[in-house]
């Protein structure tokens, strides 16, 4: 939690101070200095709980071999995904990459994650993402608070915002 002490004489002064903070806090800075390091904690934890095949798995479509999935493919595809909408509002997704670049190839990307996570008529569900998230939750929240506090302190300590003190 961040404690804020304000020393302003009227509401307009408060509004100006907070607008100055908002103007200095860029989405790119939030993503690179706050969200991405915290996301890496969750990625590592989810990768640690991701099941790995003991042998290659053949995928058939229309009774023809479509691709062969090697052990560790799903684990390797888990990562941080930043979308175009992150330019409007800072945010990241954590999960399997499968839509763009090399991850588009069916034998490399994690397009089958939902089948492992939620199960099919042939496979029991294995909620590894939830287990990984819950294992990293306390560490991630603590790191998020620490990183956000340090970014805010840096902005507040800059000139023009001397009437705000963060503790």
Image (cartoon, rainbow, N blue to C red):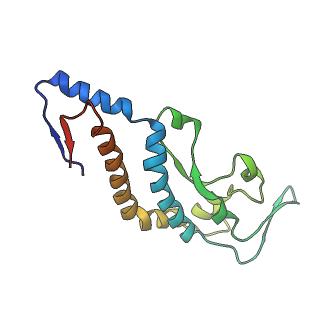
Near-viewer residue (56 or 146):
146
Q: Quadrant of residue 29?
A: top left
- Residue at (75, 52) in percent of width and height: 102
The single residue placed furthest to the front in the displayed view is 159
Residue 49 lies, with reference to residue 17, above or below; the image says below
Q: Position of residue 56 (x, y in %)?
A: 78, 72
Q: Position of residue 100 (x, y in %)?
A: 71, 46
Residue 94 lies, with reference to residue 90, above or below; the image says below
Q: Position of residue 76 (x, y in %)?
A: 66, 63
- Residue at (61, 71) in percent of width and height: 51
Near-viewer residue (64 or 167):
167
Number of numbered markers: 0
Residue 92 lies, with reference to residue 133, above or below; the image says above
Left or right position of 17 against 79: left
Left or right position of 166 against 127: left
Q: Position of residue 85 (x, y in %)?
A: 54, 35
The single residue placed furthest to the right in the displayed view is 64
Residue 130 lies, with reference to residue 160, above or below; the image says below
Near-viewer residue (117 or 25):
25
- Residue at (47, 61) in percent of width and height: 41
């Amino acid at each position: 939690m961040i404690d804020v002490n304000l020393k302003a004489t009227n509401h307009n002064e408060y509004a100006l101070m907070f607008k100055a903070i908002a103007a200095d806090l860029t989405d790119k800075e939030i993503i690179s200095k706050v969200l991405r390091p915290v996301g890496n904690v969750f990625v590592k934890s989810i990768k640690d709980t991701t099941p790995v095949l003991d042998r290659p798995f053949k995928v058939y479509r229309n009774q023809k071999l479509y691709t062969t999935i090697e052990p560790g493919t799903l684990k390797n595809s888990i990562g941080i995904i930043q979308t175009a909408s992150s330019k409007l509002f800072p945010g990241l997704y954590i999960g399997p990459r499968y839509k763009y670049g090399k991850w588009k190839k069916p034998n490399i990307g994690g397009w089958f994650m939902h089948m492992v996570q939620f199960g099919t008529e042939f496979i029991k569900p294995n909620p590894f993402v939830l287990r990984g998230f819950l294992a990293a939750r306390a560490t991630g929240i603590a790191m998020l608070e620490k990183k956000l506090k340090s970014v805010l302190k840096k902005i507040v300590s800059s000139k023009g915002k001397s009437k705000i003190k963060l503790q």
